[in-house]
Image (spheres, rainbow, N blue to C red):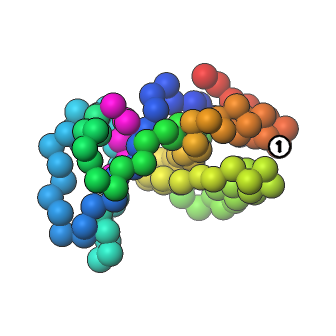
Amino acid sequence: MHLKVLASELGVVRCDPGAEIPVWVWKSPFYSITRTADELSIFCEAEAIPAAAAGAARGWRALCVAGQIPLELSGVLASLVMPMASRQISIFSISTHDTDYMLVPSDRLDDAVEVLRSAGHDIEF
């Protein structure tokens, strides 16, 4: 599988489930917003998150599965997650209609690239 590493560092912010989506989110060219009954989670470029944002965890890098993944295809995330788990590398995953993103701690990006290449994946920076 061909993966692309996004250039920017990302962060995630956990907000109360009824919170308004903050205006600073829209400054980021990459963001993902998920609201559930329990929380509002926002992933975006770390530099867009205000320093005083409560519940923020910065220091994540994203690897994107290149191209469009057919919705009926199974095992895509498993092929990425299982090698990462073998090296104790934490991940967040974000899926869109077209593809999947896997976020890893910035300080483990080199390890993630090494383990994914060893598992047969092609990584592009």
Q: Residue furthest top?
A: 125
Please give the name of the residue rendered at 70% of the width and 31% of the height, measured from the top-left corner. 110
Residue drawn at the location 49% of the way across and 25% of the way down? 7
Tell how many labels: 1
**What's the residue type where badge 1 is placed?**
Ala
Residue 95 x, y percent position in the rendering = 48, 54
Q: Quadrant of residue 49?
A: top left
- Figure check: 13 above or below 40: above
Q: Is residue 6 above or below residue 50?
A: above
User: Which picture quadrant has residue 74?
Assistant: bottom right
Residue 61, image x, y percentages: 53, 37
Q: The C terminus appears in which quarter of the rendering?
A: top right
Residue 1 sits inside the magenta stretch: no
Disc 1: which residue:
119
Q: Which span of residues is magenta-colored?
A: 42-47
Task: Return the residue nearer the eye: 46 or 81.
Answer: 46
